[in-house]
Amino acid sequence: MPKKVRIALDAMGGDFGPSVVVPGAAVALTRHPDSEFLLFGDRALIDPELEKHPALKAASRVIHTDVAVSMHDKPSVALRRGRKTSSMWLAIDAVKKGEADVAVSAGNTGALAAMARFCLRMLPGIDRPALAAIWPTARGDSVVLDLGATIGGDAHHLVALAVMGSALASVLFDLERPTVGLLNIGVEEIKGREEIREAAELLRAMNLPQLEYIGFVEGDGIGKGAADVIVAEGFSGNIALKAAEGTARQITEFLRSAMSSSWRAKIGYLFARNAFKALRDKLDPSKSNGSVVLGLNGIVVKSHGGTDAEGFAYAVDVGYEMARDDLINKIKQMLNRDSNAPAQAQTSQEAVS
């Protein structure tokens, strides 16, 4: 019988805690019956939700703690108050101890990145974590990072992101040499901040065998799928992510309003509803939910804090696939493939929350 994938859940994370995490895990279990769950959090809140999902209850174990990281806690505060006791820390620590293959949390992004880094430590040659997500584009999917694990960074940090992103794309998309672009305000070499221009020079000069650097990519190039991997520092990457999610919701509302504006529109919708459903699914941010915290000695997945159960299930799906694909060992191999691996980056600044 194949080895089960053990998934540790921060049941108290996100805007809604167990009321979303538990039913989300139940949905994920139907898709991946070979999963087992460790749920960390307040048993008084978790158990009533588990009673509604007998199959999940049978495949789960609850580890009680009444300490939870607030969505508004600064990373330093979360580490001071929640280290070794909070539901977030305990879920991550389960990965470190080998009790779980992956940890999933919808909690505070900055706190998650800080705790994961402190608990799991970084891979050799990588100084700080990055949030990477699969981004649906016009030509398929791309990997985009950093989406807000840390703010700022010098040229060496951007090069490290390029290497980690290309390693992830190689695993996910089965690409020997993914194309990589740097997110910038223009494609001309003279544009952008000094760190971005310097990173471009480094990537060209290093000519790494595991990636093909194609130059700068503007914001609209993300949706076009201009590269297999789009690299941005965390501040601009997080803004790009939130802008894309807001635009997707806006388009969905426009379509819904247009399709109900008249009886002719309603009839037209009946004929085209399958096409509109496909478009709605493509635009639905919950269906691309789940960012991988790259650079760690373990797999940690960040779910959107305000997601629903279906969206959280997609984040669990990401963690399941990463564990099944042995992501960490494959990334280690990619990072060690070339002796010119990027130098460690500067000390991490406070994370985006």
Image (spheres, rainbow, N blue to C red):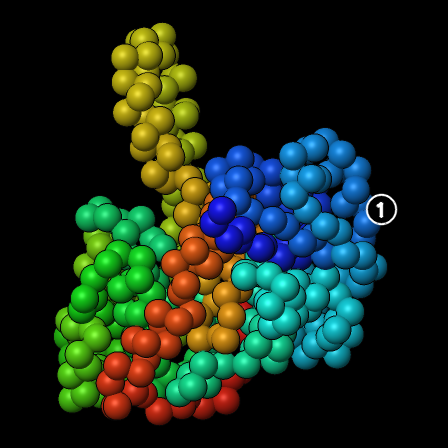
Q: Is residue 45 visible?
A: yes
Where's residue 303, x and y in %?
54, 54
Q: Nearer the viewer, residue 350 or 321?
A: 321
Give the residue number, with chain letter if any, for mark 1: 44
Which quarter of the rendering shows the C terminus? Answer: bottom right
Decide if residue 89 is on the left or right side of residue 209. Answer: right
Residue at 32 percent of width and 19 percent of height: 273
Residue at 45 percent of width and 81 percent of height: 123
Q: Nearer the viewer, residue 50 or 138?
A: 50
Q: Is residue 220 above or below residue 29?
A: below
Q: Is residue 15 visible?
A: no
Considering the numbered disc 1 on the image, is that residue within a helix, a strand or a loop?
A: helix
Decide if residue 300 is on the left or right side of residue 246. Answer: right
Q: Nearer the viewer, residue 101 or 157?
A: 101
* Residue 95 occupies quadrant: bottom right
Where's residue 270, x and y in %?
33, 12
- Of the residues shown, which amino acid type is indicated by label 1? Ala
* Residue 264 occupies quadrant: top left
Q: Residues within 10 Å of mark 1 (few under 14, many from 20)?
A: few
* Residue 241 occupies quadrant: bottom left
Q: Is residue 189 above or below residue 324?
A: below
Where's residue 70, x and y in %?
72, 62
Where's residue 156, x and y in %?
34, 87
Residue at 70 percent of width and 76 percent of height: 79
Residue at 40 percent of width and 87 percent of height: 125
Decide if residue 242 is on the left or right side of residue 175. Answer: right
Decide if residue 251 is on the left or right side of residue 206. Answer: right
Q: Is residue 183 above or below residue 198?
A: above
**Number of numbered discs visible in the structure rendering:** 1
Q: Is residue 4 above or below residue 208?
A: above
